[in-house]
Amino acid sequence: MSHEFPSPALSPATVTVASGRPAREQGGPVNPPVVLTSTNVSSGEPAPGELLYGRIDSASWHPFEQVLGELERSRHPALVFGSGMASIAAAFSLVPPGGRLVLPRHCYQVTLGYAADLAQREGVEVVLVDIDDTDAVLAALPGTSMLWIESPTNPMLEVADLPVLIEAAHAAGALVGVDNTFATPLVQRPLTLGADVVIHSVTKYLAGHSDVVLGAALSDDDDLHTRLHAYRTLHGSIAGPFEVWLALRGVRTLALRVERAQANAAELARRLSSHPAVAAVRHPSLPDDPGHERAARLMDGFGAIIGLRPHGGASAADAVVDAVRLWVPATSLGGVESSMERRRRFATESLTVPDDLLRLSVGIEDVDDLWADLSAALDASVR
Ligand SMILES: *Cc1c(COP(=O)(O)O)cnc(C)c1O
């Protein structure tokens, strides 16, 4: 690689474009190759870091792992995994059997499902908290093995006081893991605040085009980095070379996409606040949003997910999803295309998530086209 690692002098937008390139040589490629090999030439005792076998390490992962490591300002490159859930499983492997895991009540529902599985199989004590209620989180910390944080939360958009929670968790002897999928490293870098592990569903903003499922985990700590790597190798929860190449291609435009999606989301949230069919809207950009002050202070942006509750309950919410023509009715988020879903259509979604809550993932289309489609669907739903 032609750039020193990490490169703190470069701004994140530049890192997304400039890092993870092959060494410069006359006639050489500008982009890293996709290397399709399961094994590498090797005899005798392998040297440290030598490529040996495709489940342990792959040259095709390195450019993406380097760029994400630099974006999160990590001392180590990221570790790419086969999905966001695979990286969460690796992080949760740091919770010992019989340990205590504190989680946001409204974090990603499959994360909650995995925690419940750990409770059953390994006797892990799972404690759910409102992550934006700092006092409640602090009260839950004694005896905790790991505090898991999502901020903003999926799908309720609660904003956590990351620096305070991380410091208090460490004082209580707990590890801190942060799912940074919603914010992206452009908006928030939890490792720089002392978080022990950060994970991403690369599927979402980092890859950004709804065409791959991929994850990543990072740690500044040598021992934790080694354990996460060992977990990936032992469980074989690895990514394919093409998928990682696509994720790197997606990261090249991350700064533009996030900037545009956030601007669109803030404008749509503002317009939704005064739409007669809207009962409630949540986006941290709104001055009266419960997470606004904290997000303005702690984050470099407000994200591009909106929570929307139309008047008329779940059936009205379903009617909005059925009426939109430009917005895509679909689960997942963070793609270039705007999409929406009613979260409680899943029986597994937390019952404290309102039945009528629509989660909007705002993409990079023209904001007036998005508004025309959305407001027409809302108008039709209240009739
Ligand atoms: C989608 C998502 C995940 C899971 O990632 P996959 O890539 O689908 O396995 C985890 N956390 C959050 C916040 C997500 O949105």
Image (cartoon, helix red, strand yellow):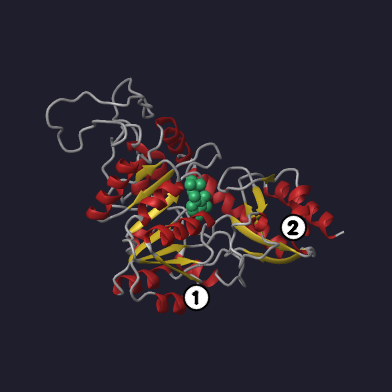
Q: What is the CA distance from the residue labelled 1 to the residue labelled 2?
A: 28 Å
Query: In the rendered image of this protein, does residue 176 appear above or below residue 20?
Result: below
Q: Residue furthest left?
A: 44
Is residue 176 shown left or right of residue 50? Answer: right
> Do the residues bearing badges 1 and 2 touch, measured as CB atoms within 8 Å?
no
Q: Residue furthest top?
A: 27
Residue 227, image x, y percentages = 27, 51
The residue indicated by pointer 2 is 317
The one of 281 and 114 positioned closer to us in this rendering: 114
Give, as a three-letter code, the residue at label 2.
Ala
Give, as a three-letter code, the residue at label 1.
Asp
The residue indicated by pointer 1 is 133
Q: Is mark 1 on a helix, strand or loop?
A: loop
Q: In which quarter of the image is the C terminus?
A: bottom right
Mark 1 Cβ inside 8 Å of ligand 1: no
Q: Residue 307 carries which label?
A: none
Upstream in the sequence, badge 1 or badge 2?
1
The one of 85 and 195 positioned closer to us in this rendering: 85
Residue 132, image x, y percentages = 50, 72
Does any portion of residue 352 appear in the rendered image? yes
At label 1, counting other C-alpha atoms closer than 10 Å, the crowd grade (few under 14, some 14-19, many 20 or more) is few
Residue 85, image x, y percentages = 45, 49
| Figure quadrant of residue 269 | bottom right
Query: In the rendered image of this protein, does residue 257 appear above or below residue 42?
Result: below
Does any portion of residue 7 appear in the rendered image? no
Picture mark count: 2
Residue 48, image x, y percentages = 16, 38
Q: Which residue is drawn at 33% across and 60% down?
A: 95
Query: In the rendered image of this protein, does residue 45 appear above or below residue 183?
Result: above
